[in-house]
Image: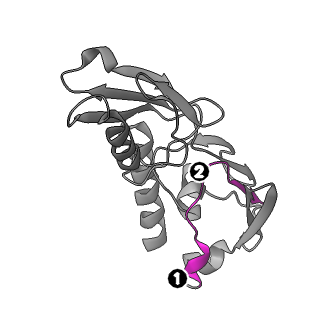
Amino acid sequence: MKLKFCMLFNVVFVFIAMVSGAVADDYKIGAGDVLEIGVWKNADLTRQLIVLPDGTVRFPLIGQIMVEEKSVAMLEKELKEKLEKFIPDPVLTISVLQVNSMMIYVIGKVNQPGRFEIRTNIDVLQALAVAGGLNPFAKEKEIGIFRKQDGETEIFNFNYKQVAEGVNLDQNIMLKRGDVIVIR
């Protein structure tokens, strides 16, 4: 009963995070995201920009700037430093209007396999909850998380049964954009 409540709580939490417009403070900007950058008292500099596949955007006065894998706070700081050459003490507002880059994939023996757009950081257990939970034929001990980094694929093992029992909780890792969870 307690496990079912925890699973329901996770589903509700993740759903709310997915449909809300705000992103987590530690969210990293990615290709395809839509940003709105505003400079107070400089309406002509306000822009809505789509992050290009190479992770950059072009902003007036500054030119092309790498934004991928930066948080909003990091980007604000960097843009402010660059704009100070042209505008004294600029006040910036940066918002992620649309998250298009944070996709995870859950495939195999879950009730609702597919691609999921995530607006906040979630762990494996939460992702399984978003995918409707394991179906009756799933092998709880044979779940893999596939992550591509620098041209290499790293595989993390996840034992649902252990995590549900409160054992080896460190295997319930936080997911990153592009992760694929395979349930056998």
Picture quadrant where residue 45 is located: top left
- The residue depicted at 60 percent of the width and 29 percent of the height is 52
Q: Residue at x 57, y 43 (%)?
A: 102
Answer whether residue 147 is visible to the viewer in this image.
Answer: yes
Q: Is 171 one of the magenta-colored residues?
A: yes
SS class of the residue under badge 2? loop
Give the residue displayed 55% in from the left and 50% down from the top.
130
For residue 1, say whether it is visible. Answer: no
Side of 133 relative to 153 (left or right)? left
Residue type highlighted by circle 2: Gly
CB contact under 8 Å: marks 2 and 1: no
What label sits on residue 166 in the rendered view?
1
In the drawing, does residue 156 fall left or right of residue 30? right
The percent position of residue 20, horizontal first and vertical second, equals 37, 38
Residue 32, percent across and down?
A: 58, 31
State the quadrant of the C terminus: bottom right
Q: CA distance from mark 2 to mark 1?
A: 21 Å
Residue 19 or residue 48, whichever sits in front: 48
Q: Is residue 63 above or below residue 125?
A: above
Pair 2/1: label in front: 1
- From the top left corner, tell me how far across and down residue 89 is, in percent: 20, 37
Question: Which residue is more in the foreground, 93 or 157?
Answer: 93
Density class for disc 2 (Cα within 10 Å; few <14, some 14-19, many ≥20) is: some
* 183 left or right of 13 in image: right
Residue placed farthest to the bottom in the image? 167
Any mark on residue 134, and which?
Answer: none
* Numbered circle sitting on residue 132: 2
Three-letter amino acid code of the residue under disc 1 = Gly
What are the residue bounds of the magenta stretch?
A: 168-184
Disc 1 secondary structure class: loop
x and y percentages locating residue 39 in the rendered image = 27, 27
